Image (tube, grey):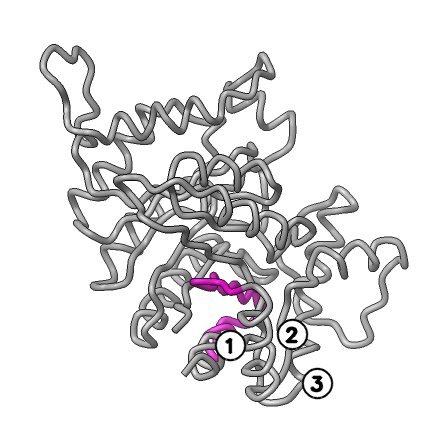
Amino acid sequence: MTKLSVLDLAPIVEGSTTKQALENSLDLARHAERLGYNRFWLAEHHNMPGIASAATAVVIANVAAGTNTIRVGAGGIMLPNHAPLMVAEAFGTLAELHPGRIDLGLGRAPGTDQATMRALRRNLGGTDTFPQDVVELMNWFEPPVPGQTIQAVPGSGAEVEMWILGSSLFGAQLAAHLGLPYAFASHFAPGDMMGAIEIYRERFRPSPRLQKPYVMLGLNVIGAETDEEAKLLFTSIQQAFANLRLGRPGKMPPPKLGLQLDPMVEHGIAQALSCSVVGNPETVKRGIAEFIARTGADELMVTGSIWDHQKRLRTYEIAAEAIG
């Protein structure tokens, strides 16, 4: 059976605060744990007024401390922003505090704009060293060898499940080459999804970390008691994407009846969010089944960004019921 997991963007919604967003993330993680979800991931974004998870490892620590069994991790850490040693130390610490429960998904993009990237003071030369940085990070997690002068403490020998994230064919090739599980960002960049899955599965090389290919796909799910209500809730995501594309990111707006967008913007959003299931419980059940049948996904990373927290909780109940 295909497993279900959660990608939470820790949304800061209009009319609320960052503190409330972080409290809602913990509440959602506990809810997902009760429902039997496999893992709960948070994503690194910077200079985004509507996302509270910029200090991703800190938020992961809070969620892991407030839950008991669900795996918790990053989907992902944007590796160009960080020294691999420091990532190993942070996630090695998390693994010591919460053994057997910590995931580390690694992304190639900076997760922000160019000006903020300069403020992060990483990769100012513009050289793409992502593959080398991933290998370096993997090595920091290995047990130290005699004569090794630098160790990740904590980190060396830590049990951290590593993933490659991607929205293009590049990540699929790297994950296959390194023998790591692969998560595709189909919830916002679905264009290369089927090609990336095919490349990853065809070229996968078994490794000590993973013996056979394992694919997790992002899927937007907005569930409600009726199709009409779900479509209304979905307008919050549509507005947020429109604001981002128009260069004015902000807090997540409330749903809007009769939403009208510029036709060009609307077309782009429709393409970006084409991997979405929106509707009543039966519609969601059918949509998830069709997506799994089409892709053969081993696991789905459900993201249900909804302005009303209680309705967000209900979406994850509907998705869990849909998978059985």
45 in relation to 256, above or below: above
- The numbered disc on residue 256 is none
- Name the outermost residue toward the left: 146
Q: Give the range drawn in magenta.
A: 296-315
Quadrant assignment for the C terminus = bottom left
Q: Give the residue at mark 2.
A: 233
In this orientation, which residue lies closer to the viewer: 131 or 178?
Answer: 178
Q: Does the magenta stretch include residue 307?
A: yes
Q: Which of marks 3 and 2 is nearer the N terminus?
A: 3
Circles 2 and 1: CB atoms closer than 8 Å = yes
Instruction: Classify residue 311 as left or right of residue 102.
Output: right
| C-alpha distance separating marks 2 and 1 | 10 Å
Residue at (58%, 51%) from the top-left corner?
50
| C-alpha distance separating marks 3 and 2 | 9 Å
- The numbered disc on residue 228 is 3
29 in relation to 321, above or below: above
Say what secondary structure mark 1 lies in. helix
Q: Where is residue 15 in the image (x, y as percent from the top left)?
A: 58, 62
- The numbered disc on residue 315 is 1
Q: Position of residue 246 (x, y in %)?
A: 79, 46
